[in-house]
Image: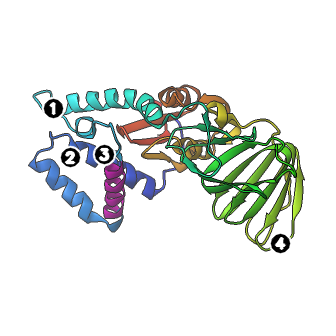
Amino acid sequence: MTRSMPARPEFIILQQAAEWWALLASNEAGANDHAKWQRWLDADPAHAAAWQRVQVISEQFQRLPGVPAHAALSVGGAQGRRAFAAMLVAAVGGLALWQWRSGEEPASINALANSAYGSAVGGVRQLSLADGSSVHLDTDSEVELAYSATARKIILRRGRIYVSSAPDRQTPPRPLLVQTGQGSLRALGTRFEVRLQGGQTHLSVEQGAVEITPLGGGAKVLAAGQGARFDDGHIDTPAQVDATAPAWTRKMLLADNMRLDAFLAELSRYRHGYVGCAPEVAALRLVGAYPLDKQDAIFAMLEASLPVQVRRPLPWWVSVSARQDS
């Protein structure tokens, strides 16, 4: 039997809450099941907190357009709980494809110079700008284009973008700027990625150079193959980064000796619901390229290549823990 450290209580409790939710939503739970659930709920304040979290995620899932939420979360009839479990497997099997299609955007659209654009969860969107530049929006991202007589400005409101700049066609040429809550970035004939995370702006430069100017001043130029984080008053020391176009623009997730918990956290950005990783498997390492539009296949690959098991008591709830081998 595989030895492993015990999972943290909060992870176990969340999984228990999800399984209780699946049972009670199945329409097959009897009075005894409800009584057991109530005793579980009352046994510990942490149980109540976990149950509330599951409720919130469930409500978010059921509000999604086009999802047969009631059918996906409940089933009746003589087949009972086995039918319910089988229905959940079927629902999960088709969910990844639905999630991607519901968030799909046109591969490329001609963007207006002064408009706002967003991408859905699971969607990757490309904007073709009138000046020849282009902007990819990662999942759940938002930008505002603000072009004027003196500047070409891209305001990043949320998420992550990849910018391929072009020389301005006007004379004198206007600078191409990406503005965030922490400062601005000026493209110097370049391709680069910008991400908002944890109250900071993350920059990675693929080609050319980018000048960072925090709101508090003190500009710094990063060359191709460099990346740095900055807030409104400080720029971290630049570090080496992969000087290639990010894989997410091709709907791929690349793992190069990546921790499993970090991998699942990144994967969760491209789907609705909850994805959890038990602490005893969090440090396992991954290498490979994974298609973001085939997430069921990703989970199958994880089970085939790592000592883990993937549990999906609900279509929108996934947890990865240590496999219990006999």
Locate residue 247 relative to residue 212 in the image: left or right.
Answer: left
Give, as a single range, the part of the protein colored magenta: 47-60
Label 3 vs label 2, nearer the camera: 3
Q: Is residue 52 magenta?
A: yes
Q: CA distance from mark 3 to mark 1?
A: 23 Å
Q: Are marks 4 and 3 in contact (CB under 8 Å)?
A: no
Q: Earlier in the sequence, mark 3 or mark 1?
A: 3
User: Helix or strand or loop: what does disc 1 sit on?
Assistant: helix
Query: Dot 2: few (<14), some (14–19), or many (≥20) neighbours within 10 Å?
Result: some
Q: Which residue is mark 2?
A: 24
Q: Nearer the viewer, residue 139 or 24?
A: 139
Q: Which residue is mark 4?
A: 217
Res. 139 visible in picture: yes
Q: Is residue 257 above or below residue 300?
A: below
Q: Are marks 2 and 1 in contact (CB under 8 Å)?
A: no
Label 1 vs label 4, nearer the camera: 4
Q: Nearer the viewer, residue 145 or 264?
A: 145
**Amino acid type of the residue tagged 2 in the rendering:** Leu
Q: Earlier in the sequence, mark 2 or mark 4?
A: 2
Q: Nearer the viewer, residue 86 or 246?
A: 246
Query: Dot 1: few (<14), some (14–19), or many (≥20) neighbours within 10 Å?
Result: some
Q: Nearer the viewer, residue 16 or 51?
A: 51
Q: CA distance from mark 2 to mark 4?
A: 56 Å
Label 4 vs label 3, nearer the camera: 4
Q: CA distance from mark 3 to mark 2?
A: 16 Å
Q: Earlier in the sequence, mark 2 or mark 1?
A: 2
**Amino acid type of the residue tagged 4 in the rendering:** Gly
Q: Earlier in the sequence, mark 4 or mark 3?
A: 3
Quarter where residue 208 is shown = top right
Q: Which residue is mark 3?
A: 62
User: Helix or strand or loop: what does disc 3 sit on?
Assistant: helix
